Amino acid sequence: MIRTTLAAAALLLAAAPAAAQTQQQALEARYTRALAAGYKALMLCGAMASAERSGWPERSEESVLAYELTGIQQPLDALIGDLSHRITRWPEGSHPIRHVVVDWAEDMPPRIAFQRSGGGCALGPIGMEARDVTETPPEARQGSIANWHMRRPGKVTPVLEAAMGGAYGAKARTTAVSVNWGEDGWDWRFADGFTPFTPQRTWSVAKSIAATLVGAAIQRGEADVKASAGLGLSESDPRRAITLDHLLRMASGRYSNTPGNRTDALYFGGSTVRETALHWPVVHQPGTVFRYANNDTLAAVAAIAHTFAEHPPAELFARIGMHDTIAETDWQGDYVLSSQVWASTMDLIRFGQLYLNDGKLPSGERILPEGWVKYVSAPSGPQPDGPFGYGAGFWLMNRSEGVPPDTFAAFGNRGQYVVIVPARQVVIVRRGEDPPGSGFDIAAFTRDVLAALAAR
């Protein structure tokens, strides 16, 4: 009898983990489906709304489904195509997008992304319904579209055409390449349906834009890279030792759960910056270990958030001439400046030119501190492994053969690149929607562009 009871207990113990595992697998599958729906809702809303705001040309649903919503990371890629969506628009005016909803579960409301009055879209948390969204119609962009077909082809043209044809990544999907040199030298190529004024998501190029916002706050006397970023719950909290400099250099010492730290809960799940990115504990002394992390950029932006009431990101973009750039927020209004920015190729050219001009506008007005370019491009913190170094919010191409060692760049997921070459007064922009594992060889492309320019 005792032996039989022990055998039955052993069977129960063996079965319990299996049952728990099955239950957990079902929970993970349900959450992943909710993330996929959030991804689809936000990408459709952001791509179409930002293009409409730019004035011309619009992005169709078919275009976004073909580019932004194919070739994305698994397991989301396998789910998104089967999730139905609906787009609603404001009834008056030019009928701008109001909501995008995506069905994902029979017993839950659809995921919802909604356009904000200042432009850009925010993703509601899982379970939010359309009736809970209180927004006003977005403001129309002020400005006009130039004749972008005018360009000056030269010896760099074959390099651009090779890039569009897959020479720097056979499976890469290039949507735009542009090279600007000197005062008036420029050439570019675009995929069908894309122009210099078509906004695309910048992904982690936004981190370099965030560093620029920090620099502008420092120039105004509203921030200090050596000061505490204000993390932690009290003055005795060890996280108070983390400075803005540590955060910009990805050297906060904070724990992150994966390389780059996946922020799916924020990006696609509808959580907020404050509940997602600011609470992580330290596991290294700040300033001693490089760990690329979305959360560090988000914390740096949170440290200057008090300046946004008077100096919102849109103000800086307008001054630089980045008229098609929109910094999106979470549903509570905090900027997701680690990734969630939409910008056109023309805007990223102007962004690079600001750095070529040492942080000054064409008028000569300084909007970034003197020496800021050297600061963001100096490898003075702990460095990553691999072919590229890291400065403060920018990657460094100081290890790339055939590229001047002062070259620094903004890199983003799916093949977003802004390469700044001070020694040659060159800005190179490449946009894409690359599938995972395909890759675009930005170092080789940069080398070939510079070689072609030198042969002029």
Image: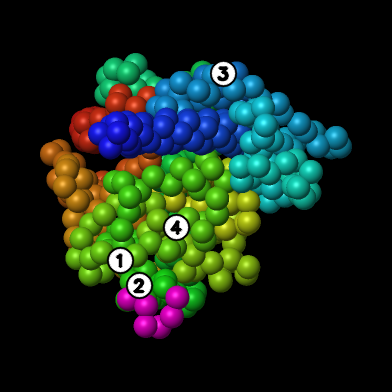
Looking at the image, is mark 3 or mark 4 earlier in the sequence? Answer: 3
Q: Secondary structure at mark 4?
A: loop
Marks 1 and 4, how far apart in space?
13 Å
Looking at the image, is mark 4 or mark 2 earlier in the sequence? Answer: 2
Q: Residue at x 58, y 51 (%)?
A: 330
The residue sitting at the front extreme is 1
Q: Quadrant for residue 52, please give it.
A: top right
Residue 183 percent across, percent down from the top left: 40, 46
Residue 271 percent across, percent down from the top left: 55, 50
Q: Quadrant for residue 238, please give it.
A: bottom left
Q: Pick the quarter of the image with the C terminus.
A: top left
Q: Is residue 326 magenta?
A: no
Looking at the image, is mark 2 or mark 1 earlier in the sequence? Answer: 2
Q: Which residue is mark 3?
A: 82
- Range of magenta residues: 233-238
Q: Amino acid at mark 2?
A: Arg
Q: Is residue 92 left or right of residue 330?
A: right
State how many labels appear. Answer: 4
Residues at badges 3 and 1 in contact (C-beta under 8 Å)?
Answer: no
Q: Tell me, for residue 239, which label it has, or none.
A: 2
Q: Main secondary structure of the magenta part?
A: loop
Q: Amino acid at mark 4?
A: Ala
Marks 2 and 1, how far apart in space?
7 Å
Marks 2 and 3, how far apart in space?
44 Å
Q: Which residue is mark 4?
A: 277
Looking at the image, is mark 2 or mark 3 earlier in the sequence? Answer: 3
Q: Pick the quarter of the image with the N terminus.
A: top left
The residue sitting at the bottom extreme is 235
Q: Which residue is mark 1?
A: 282
